[in-house]
Image (tube, grey):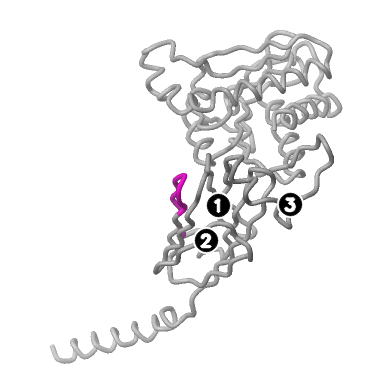
Amino acid sequence: MYSAMKKLLILCIVGLLAASPLFAEENKEVSLRFSQHDNIMRIVLESSDNFIMNANTTSTLSSIKTEFPALFQLKKQKDFVFETVMKDRFLIINLKNIGEVKTYKLSSPARIVIDLKMTQQTAKEQGAHPEQKHEQPGEKAFVPKVFVLDAGHGGYDYGILSKDSKEKDLNLLFTRDLNATLSKKGNKIFLTRKADQSLSILDRIIFGNSRNPDIFISLHSSAANTFAIYTAPADEPSADASVTLYSLNARQRRHIEKSRALAKAIGTSFKADFKGDVVLREMPLPILNSMDSAAMLIEYPSLQLNTYDQKMRDRVVSAILKGIQSYE
């Protein structure tokens, strides 16, 4: 028995010695930088991959609270306009006159990104920041956004079929093209599917909302030879079980005006570039009503009546981009 206890004691000592470097490690450095364009401010917290990915951030309109996995040192950019408080493993940023807060994590490098929409009064009080770009009259400041692009159908669900193509494949090509174009402008893009796979509506909803997007776009082919853009209706039309299954309208209600404005802007762009009618329609689609962001479903003219080679797809993507820029 004495021998067993002795072995146990030795193992404990070895374990403590092995763990001691972890506790002896110096505090991680977290850098805080920010930039501002008009009434939009972006705050970025950077550190090592594991340190950032294991951090938890909660926010209200009055404060942002980030809990890091260990003690840290803060390296803050000069002239940061908000008060910061460090307490143990917590970093608290006290806010003032903020209308909207959005937080998310990005990689390469690992960072926590916080986008703040300030009241006009606050933005004027703070004035132009050194990093702020001087814009020409009428030019809008570019603020990076988070997009979720949904390629409709997939897997065993082919969608509309033509002699030469399947809707599920064309939808995927459109989201890839749009991803490439938006990414070049500094936006963060997430695709609900990157290959030919089956995804349920619920899977798409969960994925979309987990990325905290600013804009959600689902792409499909129309059965008609016109563009159609769908947004959620303002009022819940039914208490049917299929409706309550996805908690329809609960999330989308607060974004409905943004959804309509963006749909109108893209519709105007389609009409100008393709010289045809564009249908704007409200429909209680679960994937739209359940999305916690500006959201729409875009139908391009039927693939049975049009050929969508790279040149044609580029025209469609260009029109969507113009609409987004007009909306911003």
> Which residue is at the far left?
1
Find the distance from the CA under tag 2 to the CA under tag 3: 27 Å
Label 1 sits on a secondary structure element that is strand
Q: Main secondary structure of the magenta part?
A: strand
Q: Earlier in the sequence, mark 3 or mark 1?
A: 1
- Report the residue at 80% width, 14% height from top: 306
- Report the residue at 47% width, 80% height from top: 25
Label placed on residue 105: 1
For the residues bearing labels 2 and 1, Cβ distance under 8 angstroms = yes
Q: In the picture, which quadrant includes the N terminus? A: bottom left
> Which residue is at the far right?
311
Q: Nearer the viewer, mark 2 or mark 3?
A: 3
Nearest to the observer: residue 14 or residue 101: 101
* Residue at which label 3 appears: 132
Q: Earlier in the sequence, mark 2 or mark 1?
A: 2
Find the distance from the CA under tag 2 to the CA under tag 1: 8 Å
Does residue 148 appear left or right of residue 309 in this picture?
left
The image shows residue 152 at horizontal and vertical percentages of 61, 25
Span colored in magenta: 55-64
Does residue 104 appear left or right of residue 3 in this picture?
right
- Report the residue at 45% width, 58% height from top: 66
Residue 93 vertical position relative to residue 306 in the rendered view, above or below: below
Label 3 sits on a secondary structure element that is loop
* Residue at which label 2 appears: 52
Tell me the kind of residue under disc 3: Gln
- Quadrant of residue 86 in the image? bottom left
Q: Is residue 178 visible?
A: yes
Residue 238 vertical position relative to residue 212 in the rendered view, above or below: above
Nearest to the observer: residue 175 or residue 153: 175
Label placed on residue 200: none
Binning the other alpha carbons within 10 Å of mark 1 as few (below 14), some (14 to 19) or many (20 upward) gives: some
